[in-house]
Amino acid sequence: MSAPPLGVLVVGGAGGVGRGSHLPAISSLPQVRLVGVADVDEQALDAVRREYGCATYTDLDAALTRDDVHIVDICSPDFAHAEQAMAAARLGKHVLCEKPLALSIEDALAMRQAFREAGVKAMVAQVMRFQPRWRSLRQAIAEGKIGRPALARYVLRGAFYSYPAGSFYRRPESLGQIVHNGMHYFDTVSWLVGARPVWVSAEGLEHYPGDDRLPGPNYWTIQVGFENGALGHLEANLAITQPRGCRQEIGCLVVGTEGTLASEGAEAALVERWDGGYSWPSSWPPTGSAEGFAAEIAHFARAVAEDTEPEVSMDWSVRILEACLACLQSAREGRRVELTTPEPD
Amino acid sequence: MATRVQGLPETAGVGVVGVGVRGQHSYEVWLAPRPDCRIVAVAQQPDPSTVMLEGKDPVGCAREWAARFGAEFMDDWRELVARPDVHLISLMADPLTAPLVTEEVARAGKPMIRDKYLAADLDGARQAVQACEAASVEMLVTYNVRYLPAVQHLLAELRGGTIGRPLTASFVYLVSGGPLAGFRATAEYARRVGGGELTCFGVYALDVVLEVFGAPPERVSASQGALFYDDYAEAGLEDLSQVTLRFADGALAHVLTGRTTTRPHPDCYFHLDVMGERGTLRALGPEPRHRCFAGETAALPWQGSWGVTAMVDDFLSCLRSGRPSPIPARRGYEVLQIVKAAYLSAREGRAVGLAEADSAGF
């Protein structure tokens, strides 16, 4: 007899990430059950209730106290992550938290401590590593197809995300795109290399041709060093605004001692291995598709059900967040910034 | 006082100073088949290094090289430079020695083709620039990558205003397949050349980036490593580098370059993106993705000569028509200054201004 599905409460679930990605993913999985959605937007909650038939809450505390909530999936704006995640942990709920983990390293460390003290599972929703494209790259590396990875490059090209007027992400305290989305870039490239970043050196550029703009640079070029000696380069180019509407591209290059992996272009869903070897097609779900999110949520639910450690550890994610925050410091001070967050005692 | 050789005769006599064991960067190889050039004489460089020659006899190498072209071997390189039937010098001496030869050639008033390393250090590079400029002698520093059709197309689109002012450039230029057979990086090689693969290979990319932005950067941030080859690590040389350049107008460029995996397919990874105020240009190559587009894709040939033929054509055309060299000694100095700033930046973990490289004793 299979175990009953784990109950999931999605916090901030009536927003774009929740409705666009997490709720459809949860609804597609037999091992979890959507128990409720909490949000501050009553109108959006009405729509969620109609679509999913679940309970909705504007009072988070009331939602968190439900006994049938096992997993709290946090999709709220970045500034709320730390407080909501720690509140859930204190009530013994397992926490899946959208990136970024927090907006300061102090908050991230406090979250890590709260999860440890509560004895709950916690994971940052690094969805990219659950997508087939990236998993196939990782698998090729793990199988030794290119030898020891020594260089990894991740590149994103497109226009910046034009958030609605009044959005938190248009305010300076959001810390800009490199913090909001940077954990994806850093997590992916570090995961492919198989090591934590140990320093970053970053430069940024602002290119907003019109009045529509976000705080801080929309172009970043970032050098990274990893603890295994490998080097990395992240290029987050969200400044391609002319013409507006150009397609977004995400590319990756990993060079190992015995070969090279390259995956380029939004439409050519192809992974190439250059060592006299072969290329293989890799399925490539469109941005925001539920496929990667479903795999991610299923993985976390399995970790909870089987009492195993989630693939993305909290120690790892604290370091990944530190790398994102360090980009701001590096660009400001014109120097390499060493990453120093310690392992837990 | 130097007497500048104005133009070239119908058939230019070429003198070669410095013979190595590789030949691939010996531009007399590209000059010899031309109907307007003839290799007249070959001499070994002063103070040749048997390490650089991988244990071979320096004089023997030069004799063999002369015989290959049906040219005269000469014991004295200064006499070769002074010969009246030598109108153009192919200067292939190692970078440490090249400035000395550059001065002599400039004093003789003869144009020269200089391998990509202008000098091993900035003092030598300044010496070379000063010699050429004081004598009004034209030098071609052989950064041939800018002559690749895809790069030429990209530069033409850029200069034509297609994408407006360039804001960012990202150039990944990695060679694979390992060093040439028989090569081993050593401390003596490091002393003679002045650096590893950024010096040897990355300079091509840096030259293209300078063409894109039209001015030297204000500051440079770099990281490097010997991640692929043990002999590079033992010799204190880098096989991989990345360099971020910040320009005075705020524009940014990043160059990722080096000699990587020993596996040879394809033999290089070449990906150049330039984003401007109004669009993006991209040059990819080599085969099968040799294309460049700015709104539309243009399939362009990937020259087997890596642009060397076009570069030599251009230089000889300049000499014959009295135009300045497309890649003068000063450009070689500017590129080397970035290279040295990158070494300083990588060592100290901070952004470095170009003037700092000058004063850091590189």
Image (cartoon, helix red, strand yellow):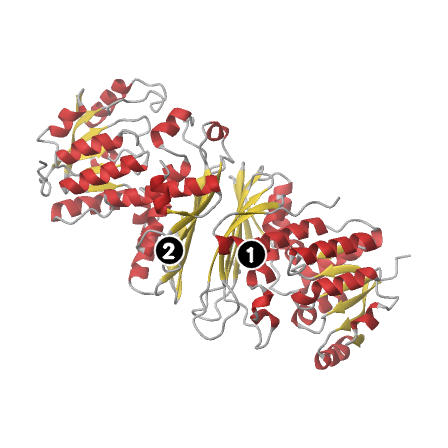
| Secondary element type, mark 2 | loop
**Residue lying farthest to the right in this orientation:** A1
Q: Which mark is residue B124?
A: none
CA gap between label 1 and label 2 equals: 35 Å
Callout 1: chain: A
Callout 2: chain: B
Residue that appears at 16% across and 47% down: B317
- Quick one: B110 or A217, which is closer to the camera? A217
Residue that appears at 23% across and 20% down: B63
Q: Is residue A325 above or below residue B15?
A: below
Residue that appears at 74% across and 53% down: A112
Name the spot of residue B232 as percent of width and height, x first: 46, 30
Disc 1 vs disc 2: Cβ atoms closer than 8 Å? no
User: Residue beneath label 1, please?
Assistant: A269
A245 relative to A42 in the view: left or right:
left
Q: Which mark is residue B247?
A: 2
Name the spot of residue A38 as percent of width and height, x first: 76, 73
Q: Is residue B161 above or below residue B47?
A: below
- Quadrant where the N terminus of chain A lies? bottom right
Amino acid carrying mark 2 in the image:
Phe
